[in-house]
């Protein structure tokens, strides 16, 4: 296939073997690997930390990861037709090829401010969303792929929100088992944290990810601010809802 014809077919048919291998090895490094599955998680983390960082760097530089990130942002995500403040959309095969080439060069990137929009909520109020630029969304997808496997190995098994391979149906099944008549637990807590994403401490987030290779880029996203009605506003707390990385 000619370079100019790069599009959905290449994105879907390409076999990113080393990408999948790196993700699998990264998850094993956090969980102790096949040879030490029963080892305490914290000890495994400390023992494999250097290997984990190397695998994360591999995923951040992976050409397959770049391809999948562009495919996700420009073809799969519901917001593929919603531009950021740069008003840029990538729709054609040649445009996607140019975007892939630009991302693969790993040129240092200064994140753009998110575009603030509002969507209606079921209670009549409006939820603010921060729409990043196309490049920022692609970079967020690349970073998410490198960061996610290790954290998946650490999250609680009864956590279902914003996790790959899990859905509301899984949570319902868990509730059904927990609420079984033979279970001694007889109460249910239904809670909603008001303004959860708006109040997250960015310093706490950066402390949690430690010396992750793309740490500075994440820090820049957190303080990039947002633009509403032509005015730039700083972000001192919280993560903008609307991008790929806000859940992490």
Image (cartoon, rainbow, N blue to C red):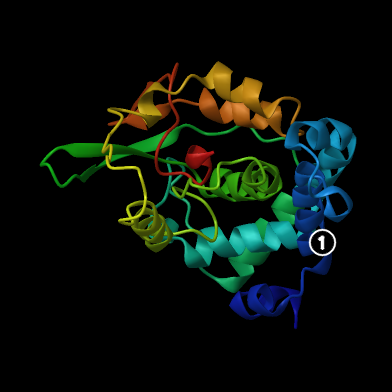
Counting every numbered tag in the picture gives: 1
Q: Nearer the viewer, residue 150 or 41?
A: 41
The residue that appears at 45% across and 25% down in the rendered structure is 225
The residue that appears at 69% across and 74% down in the rendered structure is 4
Task: Give the left or right position of residue 139, taking residue 198 as reference.
Answer: right
Q: Which residue is mark 1?
A: 21
Task: Give the left or right position of residue 36, taking residue 40 as reference.
Answer: right
Q: Is residue 40 above or below residue 142?
A: above
Q: Position of residue 93 (x, y in %)?
A: 60, 72
Task: Give the left or right position of residue 133, taking residue 125 as reference.
Answer: right
Quarter location, residue 66: bottom right
Q: Nearer the viewer, residue 97 or 160?
A: 160
The residue that appears at 75% across and 83% down in the rendered structure is 1
Q: Position of residue 106 (x, y in %)?
A: 77, 44
Question: Can residue 8 be seen by looking at this rendering?
Answer: yes
Quarter location, residue 229: top left
Quarter of the picture containing the C terminus is top right
Task: Give the left or right position of residue 179, taking residue 40 as reference.
Answer: left
The residue that appears at 15% across and 47% down in the rendered structure is 122
Q: Nearer the viewer, residue 84 or 212?
A: 212
Question: Can residue 105 be seen by looking at this rendering?
Answer: no
């Amino acid at each position: 296939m000619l370079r100019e014809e790069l599009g959905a077919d290449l994105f879907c048919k390409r076999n990113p073997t080393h990408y999948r291998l790196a993700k699998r090895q990264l998850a094993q490094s956090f969980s102790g690997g096949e040879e030490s599955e029963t080892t305490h998680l914290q000890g495994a983390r400390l023992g494999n930390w250097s290997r984990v960082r190397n695998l994360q760097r591999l995923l951040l530089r992976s050409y397959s990861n770049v391809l999948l990130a562009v495919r996700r942002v420009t073809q799969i995500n519901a917001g593929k037709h919603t531009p950021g403040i740069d008003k840029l959309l990538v729709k054609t095969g040649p445009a996607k090829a140019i975007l892939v080439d630009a991302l693969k060069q790993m040129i240092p990137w200064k994140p753009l401010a998110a575009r603030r929009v509002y969507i209606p909520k079921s209670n009549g109020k409006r939820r603010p969303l921060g729409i990043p630029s196309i490049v920022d969304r692609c970079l967020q997808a690349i970073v998410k792929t490198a960061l996610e496997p290790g954290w998946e190995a650490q999250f609680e098994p009864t956590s279902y929100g914003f996790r790959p391979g899990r859905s509301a149906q899984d949570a319902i099944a868990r509730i059904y088992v927990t609420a079984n008549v033979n279970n001694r637990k007889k109460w249910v807590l239904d809670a909603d944290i008001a303004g959860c994403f708006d109040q997250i401490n960015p310093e706490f987030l950066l402390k949690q990810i430690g010396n992750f290779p793309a740490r500075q880029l994440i820090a820049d996203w957190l303080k990039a601010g947002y633009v509403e009605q032509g005015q730039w506003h700083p972000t001192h707390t919280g993560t903008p809802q609307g991008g790929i990385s806000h859940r992490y």
